[in-house]
Amino acid sequence: MELDKIDKEEYNKQLKYFNDYYGASFREGQGTEAILELINKYACNGTLIDFGSGSNIYFWLIAFRHIEEVLCVDISKEAFFINEQIRKKELYPKSCEYALKKYNKEFDEVLKTEVNYLIYDVLYSSINSTIKYNNVSQFGLLGLCKSEKEYISNLEKLYNLLKKGGILLGANWCFSTSYSKKMGFNNNYLSEKIVRDFGEKQNCKILYVKKVPIVNDPNYDSALIYAIKHE
Ligand SMILES: C[S@@+](CC[C@H](N)C(=O)[O-])C[C@H]1O[C@@H](n2cnc3c(N)ncnc32)[C@H](O)[C@@H]1O
């Protein structure tokens, strides 16, 4: 990724996200502890494809036990640029210290994981991949869907990339009223029920689903987190 091809405005937006969230010290009570535990408990070893990956894959990788290779998919090449700055140690995600301590890991080891990038509009394009993965994840992407119908059809798209026995891990932040106004839509449809209904329709196993409250964040009231097993 070359610097001259980077859109400055998008880079600054992604950098703000990094500085406000994972670049800052770890804040408890934002649902993040529960997501780390979800990954650590339910993810399987092998490959991973992470959708809406942004600049945060190394943070979540700390909680996985052994990932051979990750494919990060995002619409923003600027987010990937930041991720590369983290790998090259030009940027330091302070929040990682919490997870490193929790899982007794060294950041240098985590940074050695093979990470590849794919710039792609996930929400509004089809995905026809013959390659299947041991783990599929999305942390913060599908909650950007404007309706329940859109959410479910995208979840189905991601689920279809799993190998038999593979695990889909998801986390979506439910917008506060003021953030919904700012965004121009709400994601009030996020509920444990939509995940359970999905499990019934697909005949797959819901290993975990919970809406976790979030404290003291003006943008988010709760986070819906889940692990689904492909049977
Ligand atoms: C809330 S951030 C989450 C980033 C990261 N997964 C994390 O855990 O911090 C949402 C990400 O989704 C990406 N995104 C938004 N719309 C997208 C789309 N249509 N296709 C792919 N990625 C998209 C954004 O660029 C951003 O990096």
Image (cartoon, helix red, strand yellow):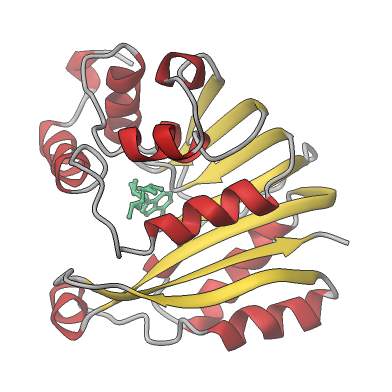
Image quadrant assignment for residue 111: top left
* x and y percentages locating residue 110 in the rendered image: 49, 22
The residue lying at 88 percent from left, 62 percent from top is 231
The residue lying at 65 percent from left, 52 percent from top is 41
Decide: is 115 above or below 120: above
- Does residue 32 appear to the left or right of 109 in the view shown? left
Image quadrant assignment for residue 144: bottom left
- Does residue 174 appear to the left or right of 192 in the view shown? left
* x and y percentages locating residue 211 in the rendered image: 47, 78
The answer to whether residue 187 shows anywhere in this view is: yes
* x and y percentages locating residue 162 in the rendered image: 76, 50
- Does residue 20 appear to the left or right of 166 in the view shown? left
The residue lying at 42 percent from left, 71 percent from top is 145
The residue lying at 15 percent from left, 48 percent from top is 20
Number of marks: 0
**Front position in the image: 7 or 94:** 94
Decide: is 81 above or below 109: below
**Front position in the image: 149 or 169:** 169
Image quadrant assignment for residue 70: top right
* x and y percentages locating residue 62 in the rendered image: 49, 34
Decide: is 100 above or below 28: above
**Front position in the image: 59 or 134:** 59
The answer to whether residue 55 shows anywhere in this view is: no
Q: Split into 4 quadrants, where in the image is the N terminus?
A: top left
